[in-house]
Image: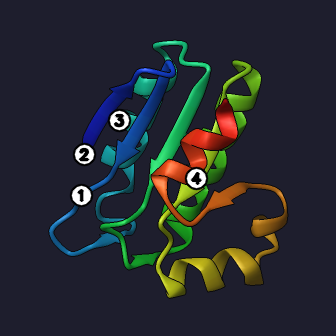
Amino acid sequence: MIINNDITGCAIVSPNFNNRRITVSNAEEFKKELFKVLDNNYLNLILNLKDIDIIDSTGLGVIITSYNRAQNRNCKFKLCNLSNAVANLLHMTKLDQALDIYSSVDEAVASIK
């Protein structure tokens, strides 16, 4: 997991798993890392999924739980660089209507300013 703190006071989290998936096998590790970031009281969190091809229901649950935790802490939660499979999953579950999704980190950061 790569975490950058950009000058806008924004945490940019880029999960990087060898199998390019967020599944039941690594979801707990993913959740712990996201919660650590959220516990640092950032005003913005960008989840950069450039290195993720597949997310299963457990991984999706982590994203939803993290989004809710961010909302409770007045932290804006954004996603970017989605693979086609992940974008389709969010569309099928209608989560694309609830989450802020951008095509790049730069677009997500620009939406904060």
Q: Amino acid at mark 3?
A: Glu
Q: How crowded is the residue under tag 3: few (<14 C-alpha within 10 Å), some, or many (20+)? A: some
Q: Amino acid at mark 4?
A: Glu
Per the model, the C-alpha gap separating discs 3 and 4 is: 23 Å
Residue at the spot of label 1: 16
Q: Nearer the viewer, mark 4 or mark 1?
A: 4
N-term mark: 2 or 3 = 2
Nearest the eye: 48 or 110: 110
Between 103 and 96, the one lying in front of the other is: 103
| Dot 2 and dot 3 residues touching (CB under 8 Å) | yes
How dense is the environment of label 4, judged by Cα within 10 Å: few (below 14), some, or many (20 and up)?
few
Q: Secondary structure at mark 1?
A: loop
Disc ID at residue 1: 2
Residue 84: x and y in percent read 52, 86
Label 4 element class: helix
Q: CA distance from mark 4 to mark 1?
A: 21 Å
Quadrant position of residue 44: top right
Rendering quarter of residue 66:
top right
Would you say 30 lies left or right of 70 here? Answer: left
Contact check, label 3 and label 4, Cβ < 8 Å: no
Q: Which residue is mark 4?
A: 107
Left of 72 or right of it: where is 24? Answer: left
The quadrant of the picture occupied by the N terminus is top left
**Can you tell which of label 1 and label 3 is closer to the viewer?**
1
Q: Residue 93's quadrant in the figure? A: bottom right
The Cα atoms of the two marked residues, 4 and 2, are separated by 21 Å
- Asked which secondary structure carries label 2, the reply is loop
- Asked if the residue at tag 2 contacts the one at tag 1, i.e. Cβ–Cβ closer than 8 Å, the answer is yes
| Residue bearing mark 3 | 33
